[in-house]
Image: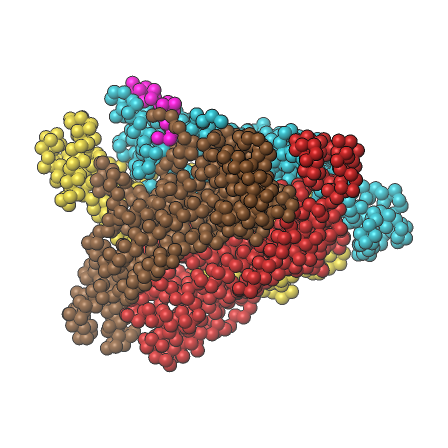
Chain colours: A yellow, B cyan, C brown, D red
Amino acid sequence: MKPSSSTSEARRYGLFDGVLARGDVPAAVSDRAWLEAMLEVEAALARALARTGVIRAEEAVAIERACRADEFDIESLGRDAVGSGNPVVPLVRELTNAVEGSAAGQVHRGATSQDVLDTAAMLVARRAGAILCSDLSATADAAAELADTHRATLMAGRTLLQQALPITFGLEAAGWLEGVDAAVGRLADVCRTRLAVQLGGAAGTLASLGSDGPAVLGFLARDLELPEPVLPWHTDRTRLSELAGALGAAAGAVGKPARDVILLAQTEIGEVREGTPNRGGSSTLPHKRNPIAAVSALACAEQAPGLVAILFGAMVHEHQRAAGSWHAEWRPFTDLWRAVGSSAAWLRDCLEHLEVRTATMRQNLDLTGGLLLAERVATALAPALGRLPAHELVERASRDAVATSRPLGEVVAEMPEASKHLDVAELKRLLDPAGYLGSAEAFIDRALEAHVTRGAHR
Amino acid sequence: MKPSSSTSEARRYGLFDGVLARGDVPAAVSDRAWLEAMLEVEAALARALARTGVIRAEEAVAIERACRADEFDIESLGRDAVGSGNPVVPLVRELTNAVEGSAAGQVHRGATSQDVLDTAAMLVARRAGAILCSDLSATADAAAELADTHRATLMAGRTLLQQALPITFGLEAAGWLEGVDAAVGRLADVCRTRLAVQLGGAAGTLASLGSDGPAVLGFLARDLELPEPVLPWHTDRTRLSELAGALGAAAGAVGKPARDVILLAQTEIGEVREGTPNRGGSSTLPHKRNPIAAVSALACAEQAPGLVAILFGAMVHEHQRAAGSWHAEWRPFTDLWRAVGSSAAWLRDCLEHLEVRTATMRQNLDLTGGLLLAERVATALAPALGRLPAHELVERASRDAVATSRPLGEVVAEMPEASKHLDVAELKRLLDPAGYLGSAEAFIDRALEAHVTRGAHR
Amino acid sequence: MKPSSSTSEARRYGLFDGVLARGDVPAAVSDRAWLEAMLEVEAALARALARTGVIRAEEAVAIERACRADEFDIESLGRDAVGSGNPVVPLVRELTNAVEGSAAGQVHRGATSQDVLDTAAMLVARRAGAILCSDLSATADAAAELADTHRATLMAGRTLLQQALPITFGLEAAGWLEGVDAAVGRLADVCRTRLAVQLGGAAGTLASLGSDGPAVLGFLARDLELPEPVLPWHTDRTRLSELAGALGAAAGAVGKPARDVILLAQTEIGEVREGTPNRGGSSTLPHKRNPIAAVSALACAEQAPGLVAILFGAMVHEHQRAAGSWHAEWRPFTDLWRAVGSSAAWLRDCLEHLEVRTATMRQNLDLTGGLLLAERVATALAPALGRLPAHELVERASRDAVATSRPLGEVVAEMPEASKHLDVAELKRLLDPAGYLGSAEAFIDRALEAHVTRGAHR
Amino acid sequence: MKPSSSTSEARRYGLFDGVLARGDVPAAVSDRAWLEAMLEVEAALARALARTGVIRAEEAVAIERACRADEFDIESLGRDAVGSGNPVVPLVRELTNAVEGSAAGQVHRGATSQDVLDTAAMLVARRAGAILCSDLSATADAAAELADTHRATLMAGRTLLQQALPITFGLEAAGWLEGVDAAVGRLADVCRTRLAVQLGGAAGTLASLGSDGPAVLGFLARDLELPEPVLPWHTDRTRLSELAGALGAAAGAVGKPARDVILLAQTEIGEVREGTPNRGGSSTLPHKRNPIAAVSALACAEQAPGLVAILFGAMVHEHQRAAGSWHAEWRPFTDLWRAVGSSAAWLRDCLEHLEVRTATMRQNLDLTGGLLLAERVATALAPALGRLPAHELVERASRDAVATSRPLGEVVAEMPEASKHLDVAELKRLLDPAGYLGSAEAFIDRALEAHVTRGAHR
């Protein structure tokens, strides 16, 4: 057993991992993190056995003392796992070798490999979940700040990527905020209510512990500060599926603003830019500022649905231990955390440094010469002209404005049927997008308030 | 062979649907159900507009009066939707035609198609969710009864489909119960907390309602008895993704017992049979009782992960209306409800009529002549012989028992090193599987108690 | 509003189906099409049995005569299938009832339900495949025409949605062409080589046909003009998976141009418009032309990956008939055809009527004042200044051009180090995007030639 | 740049990888393999540029000399890739530093990062594909040997996991053979026809190579012995999707026999055992022989559908470089190869060492006392009694046999209506499963012949 300090880092900075991995979740689900979690479970099990009187206190101490991740080599554990079916078998073998005296015989007592791996998965999820919630919360904070700062920043609202009606950039950001807040809320909830210690022995009865099973289970749960389950859950994978669902939802909530940023950053639109210096730039193409953080966030998020599907598809565990579906979970579970964790960290980076180009927003909004307000003009004319005639008149004006490339206001002003009822000042007022924002600001306030309330409850 | 009369029924009993569709969820997500939900939204919107004073009370009444599903033809709505991009456009057109007087001009006022379809989706989900929760609860009840009845019914616990240790069938059923209870708990939770009315107008600002937007939104929510969202959520799809996640988890929780039943019903194992008469039987093969309900439950459940992945993959909605991802949701959302709803109804049917063949369970458990208890014998010998020698002795005995096809007890009894420490009575006691069940019964009690508690809280 | 008459049409024009279903594939995979295919199999089986001498020729004629789809009611078949596990059971029952005399006893002789359904799936796939190949080919033709027409139409090439280098619209269209041609090539190939008749009887041995099995199989294959398989393939689902893979690839090949069109049609970019009149327009927003066909194509395509995953996930068929995975295939198989078929039909529609706005393409290309050509200028200066100094100079010029909002050419012309080596005419030449297209035209020619060659070989 | 010989191995033997990774595909898609492939592309590009006269021959030699994987550190490349968006950027930087003299300026000339990574992906796929084809072929050989050896080994055919009709184990194995042969055929085909070099420069025009683009492309293709594409395919992902589809199909073809083996190896069925010594065994449970290879094969195969879905879902690449979907491909592409490669290697191991327990097969077949042959007896009685009465008689006999736990033959022999027409010898003959195998042997011969033919053509 030689120390292998670099292995987990090597994995973190693999050829492709380095490109997309970001934030602290990748390290929290690394091989090293799993090793530490498994050893933590073995140590806690020993303590729980001692508290129940199954083993002696000194034996627990001896086991605990040997549960030091630095003393194990991940690579050789991986290699030795071939043929045994899971990495706990070689781990327990090496741990037993490392424990001195009679305590060696008490290592892993009463437990089966899946107990250790499943409980370790919960510990890994708790840590990765805390980091991810923190990154998502910071992302939501950044969105909230954008929403507040830009509550009056006019921009074109776009449906099917066509300009539709004026909105504010604050409202767009408030929408991002809501999605991310929902994701963090759900993930925090799953992590708080659905993690649980797993201990069932070979067939879920804890047979070898006699009648001490529930007591050991209870002490183990309290020791690890994980909820105690009603039953061993080795073949009930709803806990994992809820984690997977929460992660998949988070990926979607992150992907939405990421793609919006990419679209707003298009050369021809130019309404935002990623502000992180020395990234995404090109020496020979200074106009080009690739939205690398948003692109990376989206690239990570796109991998989530398929990984979630693997985990949902692997929920059917036969009888007391699945013949394949348990083993099938390990990599996608880890990969899903890494992908979604990185995705959130990239979006946080993106939103915390977003350069908002308000003048360009306004320019783009004015591109259509007031057509986004045509409906408003028609509504204003309706009382005088009747609803249908008013609409027909404005429609004609709009077509004319497009055909002659003139602003709608100019065309309408020249139409006697219209100008008779709308003087120039009134027409100008109607064509001011700032006056046709409906409840945008009210909605922003609601979103900000809800964000604060949620934060206070977390 | 008479021609079909009702379109929604025709869809329910399509060629393949009839085979797998089961329970009441398929009808609750049928085209007819969607049509009714959309009309309910239009009527409620009219009432909300009237309460806010945007339209007159008589206009709301006139609109409400026209919102009768029987007056609309689903097929022609579907046909007319081609080119408009969604079914709300022709619906509003026909509804407007059906409304008399000035009220016609107020139909759908302030709303956009997606407002109606998204809110209708929530109504559909609420109804389908209630049915599904009810079917899942009944399934859990059936599992609970099996757990209670068979708390002492011995059977072989199986890991990787190999006999491992004795358990009780009650414990197996308690595991099913826990999974299904978790699924129903989560689904009920999502339906209670994450449904919400959607109303935002063309770009999410409710611009055409001036400053009345939030009031109309509030009245609409109260009228439909749906929560009021902080913001219009037209491009925040976390609500749908949580529904999808809960449905995917339910499919997994249903698939697990379904496959266990299929495995237990194998000809060579024969520990359970589906009890529904006139189904799954074969006239010429009377020994054959196909576990049709379990097979159908599993077939439905297998479709869920891919459908969930489509919905998670469609979460990235651009700006104020997605260019594709919104439209991509409709069918998989409906299909997911139908698949999971049917899956649960099939499993309910299966478990409510399950024939448990306890004698065969015991026979199978005895197949290996006591080998499942070898570990227990070794543990009993350990104090006298030392842990390792005891294990080696029992190992030798076990190999001998397999080689000579004799019961383990017989072989051990003939070994002087063993018989010196274990008399025949003690050996017999050790080899009785009923005595090596660990905490099985305690766990069953916990599961039953938790089931009752959860039911009381729902 | 009149009631629907035809069930299969009702299904085609369901509430949501009407919106997205397009082209002739949806009808080719409808319940009616499946019914016809199953009856075709039963009739062909009867003929094959007669040719082998297993039944009499008159019996085959009697069976064949009863195999008329109009005589069967899909809805009642669907309803009666409940409990029997598949729709062939009630079909055979009704068919037997409809056949007169001794022939009734020969209906379905030697076959099992899965034989009929699997072979019917192949017939359905052959027809749907031919339609889809035809729609994809027409789509490729439309792309080819765009590529040829616009071989010299300058536009900005975009990477990560940022303008990068000049290209031609012809090259963009040639890329679409290549993808669609690859998809149609693969799909045609699968349909030609991987369809096959399925006939194995209850366990794949054709036991009840004695030694006549292979002969009946051979006649059946020739009759249906489907390849004869080496073995009954009831539990070897590689054929279906290859169809699924080809459909998934086609969805991707269709989705790519669909999203490109949506992006090019953005209000601020405006380089293309969907040309179909009376669609996607808005009376009050005449500037708005929603790219409905492209959006619908993408919405359909987005559903494919998850459906493909269901089919791949259902490939593990136990022993001689799967306990769930066979039933799980039916709907996703049909839905995948419908989604991809509609997707291709939408894109065909889109590309056949695409309005290309070449002037706007040029305007957008000029937006950055020559910066896309900066690299070319640097390369031209390198021989005189050295590679690194040349790059640094142009970099400086580019930054200056961006900062002062001037064209790059103007800035460079004022730099003595540059103007010393590049006169105004040469600089103008270098900054002409038409001169920096590399092999764009050569590539277009290659793509067009390959398209013609492939068409000739199909 | 310090050598990092262990990194790729560390990745191969990560904590979980070691458990499931098997065969040589994992190493062929390791970070080290990718690095080597990328350097191979850079070297070949230099040679192609030299042959076209774009750079000097000595420059190509200098570049080639620096393209040695040992000189690069994967971990630091990964770390440095952060912010640049892909691992080629730091690789080219380090490679440029390592090249001496003027040649440094020619490194990567004309190419863009995606050219290198996409072409490297093709090289990786070619190698991994060759290994996988070889493992699949060996698996098919093993299945063929089982089919041949056990062409007369009787066993129960099972539908929905219920005994249905007698088959031979040879036929079951022939079915496995067909599936695996189809998978290897398709994969070999994709690898032969759909790999291609990628070279397009920043926007797919090869602008910086002037008119030399096609020549360089051609030389590069010949140098790497990869087909030359019609067009740069950077945003046409049909090639990758066909690889993904072929891998997904292979996973299904491998998963099917894997699950069959697991089912046959159940304690109560015991018809096969995995024969590899020292694996899957348990010291204290000598009866237990976990089918570890089959379980691992299935666990790997289960991960494929979701990974395939990610790749299909990432096919929509915007314009000239995708904003996310390209980056999203890297990990699932690699993971899919590893999962399917390992899956095939595990199944090869399983089938090459499968212990077939023919006596147990026969015992299980006899479990139902001849009921599997009931249909045959009825058919034999039909000429004498009439079809319906014959069936009713046998049905009665079967029910009686089940009820009284007697063999069917005994019951029938006691029925005068039957014994009048069937003497004891004839009845015995009819009840001999060996006589009711239909075309099983003929089918096996066809499968073996086809396997030989396919092998000869590969």
- Please say if D198 is above or below D252: below
Residue C19 located left or right of residue B273: left
- Residue at the spot 21% in from the left edge and 48% down from the top edge: A363
- Please say if A448 is above or below A79: above
Q: Position of residue B213 (x, y in %)?
A: 31, 31
Residue D103 located left or right of residue A229: left
Quadrant where the image shows the C terminus of chain B: top right
- Please say if C157 is above or below B206: below
Q: Position of residue C27 (x, y in %)?
A: 40, 39
- Please say if C390 is above or below D16: below
Any part of residue D279 in sight: no
- Residue at the spot 55% in from the left edge and 51% down from the top edge: C229
Any part of residue B59 in sight: yes
Classify residue C174 by image quadrant: bottom left
Segment colored magenta:
B50-76
- Residue at the spot 62% in from the left edge and 61% down from the top edge: D141
